[in-house]
Image: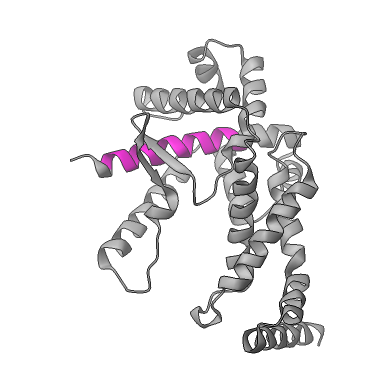
Amino acid sequence: MSVGKTIQTEDVLWQNYLATKSPAAREAIILRYAPLVKYVAGRLAIGFPANVEFDDLVSHGVFGLMDAIEKFDPTRNIKFETYAIARIRGAILDGLRSNDWVPRSVRQKARELERTCADLENKLGRSATDQEISEALDVSLHEFYQLLSEVSCTTLSSLDELWTINSNEEDSVRVLDLIRNDDSKDPLLHVELEEIRTTLGNAIDCLPERERMVVVLYYYEGLTLKEIGEIMEISESRVSQIHTKAIFRLRGRLNRWHKSTTEV
């Protein structure tokens, strides 16, 4: 009975808002879905440095929720929660990015790590081990794990993130540009989207077992790093390191895929 009542309440809220667009109806919608903002902020906060305040994440996320409410089209048969979570996440990352929350030195280290992982994979024909990566970076294994913790905050991305090709900003492409979905059906776009999904799926399948498990549990099952750590019987910080390695491997493979599709 409680579930049916909740669904009815949501329907009434949306009907009222779409019919009137009144500030009161809008506020009611915002209050109804406000927990989504804390949910997304809580998941993202795990990968951020200590100087990033949780309340700041929530503040940015509220703007994303408001934008989602304004642009949501119920006729497209998409759950609002699914649509809103993407908007909230993007708004939080865009807000932090505009404040330059990641030092330039950290971004440089992240790029170096990504290039190293990609180069080793090309050379070895497989995923490089932690020892191999640390040796290629000319650091100890302990220093490598410290590096993973330091750059973990750069592995969170939004649809506005640029993929850089050949270290040339003029040869950059937004992820959003790769998955744009216009109202008109485009067979070529459909093929490209399927190829992206296939490439990403294959890249995930090729990850080492522990990294693949973390990616699946975090992105597909919606678990927090703490929950994943309990399942895998390792510390939350270790899960964060494994997640960071997985994302850098996936970035390298997707960048190579994009480069191969743009070269003639």
Which quadrant of the view contains residue 143? top right
Residue at 66% x, 16% y: name it.
142
Q: Say if the magenta span includes residue 12.
A: no
For the question of whether residue 137 can be seen, the reply is: yes
155 over 86 or under it: above or below: above
Residue with the most extreme front position: 23
Is 222 left or right of 53, judged from the image as shown? left
Give residue 187's position: percent from left, percent from top.
26, 67
- The quarter of the rendered structure image containing the C terminus is top left
Res. 234 in view:
no
State which region is magenta.
Answer: 243-260
State the image quarter where residue 9 is shown: bottom right
* Along the viewing direction, whichever of 78 and 172 lies nearer the viewer: 172
Residue positioned most to the left: 264
Q: Residue at x 57, y 38 (%)?
A: 155
Specify the farthest residue to the right. 2
Q: Total marks drawn?
A: 0
Q: Where in the figure is residue 125, as x and y percent of width and height?
A: 36, 28
Q: Position of residue 41 (x, y in %)?
A: 72, 52
Magenta region, main secondary structure? helix
Left or right of 60: which side holds 260? left
In the rendered image of this protein, does residue 169 appear above or below residue 216? Answer: above
Quarter of the image with the N terminus is bottom right
The structure's colour scheme is one colour
Residue 251 in the magenta stretch? The answer is: yes
- State left or right for residue 145 relative to residue 121: right
Q: Position of residue 22 (x, y in %)?
A: 70, 82
